[in-house]
Image: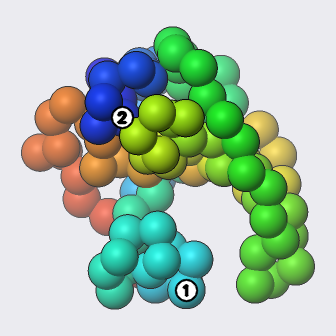
């Protein structure tokens, strides 16, 4: 279970995430305001979200379309859909209620 800062959006992971990455691309640095951002790759059907979301679409540095979904109240990003990987969501795991399980499989 996890959610945004204000609590208006909550989510539940169904099943085990595919992988956890620590990414150092400019977009992840901007989102996290750090040297890297963490991303859980989860199957599209592996995430149950409650609450209203807004979306923002952009073109990545690699030329791919990415759609980000975030809380309209506090602005916290919940997940993204990288169009270059079919059926996968990129979830920002720092919003999990319990983050003790976070151990990146790779650094990008």
Viewer-proximal residue among 58 and 47: 58
Q: From this viewpoint, is residue 37 visible?
A: yes
Figure quadrant of residue 2: top left
Tell me where residue 53 appears, x and y as whole percent: 61, 29
Q: Which mark is residue 107?
A: none
- Label 1's element? helix
Q: Residue at x 55, y 35 (%)?
A: 72
Does 18 sit left or right of 85 as displayed?
left
Q: Which mark is residue 26?
A: 1
The colour scheme is: rainbow
Q: Which mark is residue 4?
A: 2
Quarter of the image that includes the N terminus: top left
Q: Nearer the viewer, mark 2 or mark 1?
A: 2
- Label 2's element? loop
Does 62 sit left or right of 70 as displayed?
right
Q: Residue at x 76, y 75 (%)?
A: 60
Does 27 sit left or right of 108 as displayed?
right
Residue farthest along the left direction in this orientation: 100
**Residue 9 versus residue 85 in the image, above or below:** above
């Amino acid at each position: 279970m996890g959610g945004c800062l204000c609590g208006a959006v909550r989510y539940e992971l169904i099943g085990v995430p595919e992988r956890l990455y620590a990414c150092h691309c400019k977009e992840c640095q901007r989102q996290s305001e750090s040297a890297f951002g963490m991303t859980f790759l989860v199957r599209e059907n592996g995430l149950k979200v409650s609450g209203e979301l807004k979306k923002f679409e952009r073109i990545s540095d690699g030329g791919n379309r990415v759609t980000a979904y975030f809380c309209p109240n506090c602005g916290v990003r919940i997940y993204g859909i990288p169009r270059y990987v079919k059926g996968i969501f990129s979830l920002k795991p720092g919003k999990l209620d319990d983050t003790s399980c976070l151990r990146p499989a790779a650094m990008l």
